[in-house]
Image (cartoon, grey):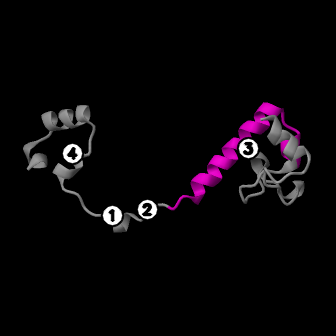
Amino acid sequence: NAEEVQAREAGGDDVPAAAGASGAGAGGSNGDGELDQEFLAALPEDIRNELIQQNRAQRAAAAVPRPDPSSAAEMDSASIIATLPPELREEVLLTSDESVLA
């Protein structure tokens, strides 16, 4: 996006700035998930934009809290089967052993 490129070139904070080129790790990241500005500036615009979008997606995914499996309620077989899409539910019901369905 041209606006993002202009904001970066103008020193805007649209893209997180890294501590410096010497602190950059593999792939132009400084280890904190931030992209190095010198690394980005050396890339073609389409690749730079793709890396910025990937970085934002990774940071957003990392910010989402993971559910604690120990607090999950146990479900019986019938409840699990009931949550399946109709086609899959039919296949499970037709192919499952009676002990699963009991």
Point out residue 85 in the picture as x, y percentages from the top left corner. 27, 37
At mark 3, the secondary structure is helix
Considering only order in the chain, which callout, 1 or 3, is on the residue closer to the N terminus?
3
Q: Is residue 46 magenta?
A: yes
* Rendered position, 34 above or below 97: below
Tag 3: residue type?
A: Ile
Q: Which residue is mark 3?
A: 52
Work out whether residue 17 or residue 25 is closer to the camera in this orientation and state it. 17
C-alpha distance separating marks 1 and 4: 17 Å
At mark 2, the secondary structure is loop
Residue 67 numbered mark, or none: 2
Which quadrant does the N terminus fall into? top right
At mark 4, the secondary structure is helix
| Circles 4 and 3 in contact, beta carbons < 8 Å | no
Residue 20 numbered mark, or none: none
Point out residue 17 in the picture as x, y percentages from the top left corner. 83, 55
Q: Is residue 95 left or right of residue 72?
A: left
Q: Which residue is mark 4?
A: 81
Tag 4: residue type?
A: Ile
Query: Where does the magenta region start and end?
Result: 38-65
